[in-house]
Amino acid sequence: MIKSRSNLLILMSMAIIILFLGITIFSGCKEEAAPGEEIVEEEEVTEEESEVKQFEGQELLISGSTTLLPFAEPVAAAFMDKYGGSVTIAGGGSGTGISECINEINDIANSSRQVASEEIEEAQSIGIELVEVLVAYDGISIILSGNIEGVEELSIRQLSDIFRGIITNWSDVGGPDAEIILASRDSASGTYEYFLEAVVQMEKSEEENDFAPTVLALQSNADIVNTVTTTDNAIGYIGLGYLQEALDKGASVITVEGVEPSVETIKNGTYPISRGLYNYYREGDLNGMGLAYLDFIQSNEGQEIALDTGFVPIN
């Protein structure tokens, strides 16, 4: 009897120990699970906070004017950061961008000139209407090689004569006795066309005027900057957005009709070689992302980027 009771006490003790261990293990499991539960909650919060951006997975192709590149590239980056999607910016010149827009290769054309009447007719012949959007203003800066001294100002007439090959020596305009090297854009460039009409042809009052056959026809503003800063006795014309780079590399800038190119002089209309910069798209063919991009580039945020990159805001 005593033995049975002893056995019973042993069994009861073991049961208590097992029960205690079970409770401890169960409690331990609950404690281990708690951090896991918190992690899941944190992941859920993170997923809620990182909502998919509006145009994620969509693409937009913009091509054309190299003058617009310093402005368009940071605008595209800011737009993608805010709304998602992929915006590709390509150069090639205004004429190329407009042609690609007409032929439905790009979504939007960058242009440093207004679309020409023959381009409008080409588009309309295949049922396309081009829509124009003004995005900024720009001034054409005249830069000289760093070795040219004594030339600080030129008139529109003098510039016309220089780029036509009538004036061929720097000594004729107060500079050294050296042949003038002409750096120009190629004919696909909107800047080329604008400079031809506004300067070489004297606001189209002398339409028979043309560039001298000795002119260097270059593909981009950057090419003109590099040519003028690495070649003695050269003169070239570039968009205002490239002026600081040219100055940093050793070029000098001259005044035109006594006025220096700047945001202020372009905005108040006193600088004589300035123009609008444009985007073009096919009417009825631009998706929501493209329309949002155009709204963004004209917004206060987009125009602040224009100012920061050396262009003149439209508002």
Image (cartoon, rainbow, N blue to C red):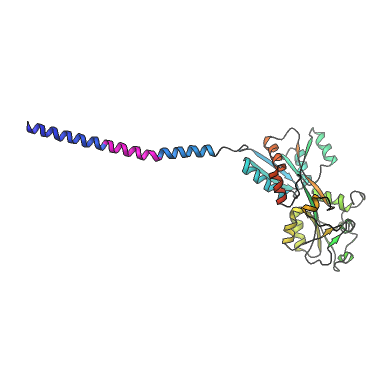
Identified at 75% across, 58% down, the residue is 225
Residue 69 seen in the figure: no
Identified at 17% across, 33% down, the residue is 12
Which quadrant is home to the N terminus? top left
**81 or 16, nearer to the observer:** 16
The residue positioned farthest toward the bottom in the image shown: 177
**289 or 180, nearer to the observer:** 289
Q: Is residue 29 magenta?
A: yes
Q: Is residue 102 magenta?
A: no
Prevailing SS of the magenta stretch: helix
In the image, the segment drawn in magenta is: 22-35
Residue 281 seen in the figure: yes
Count of all numbered marks drawn on residues in the image: 0
**11 or 128, nearer to the observer:** 11
Q: Position of residue 19 (x, y in %)?
A: 24, 34
Which quadrant is home to the C terminus? top right
Q: Position of residue 203 (x, y in %)?
A: 89, 49
Q: Is residue 74 left or right of residue 207?
A: left
Against 3, residue 246 (above or below) is below
**121 or 298, nearer to the observer:** 298
Q: Position of residue 187 (x, y in %)?
A: 82, 49
Identified at 36% across, 40% down, the residue is 32
Q: Position of residue 199 (x, y in %)?
A: 87, 53
Against 21, residue 200 (above or below) is below
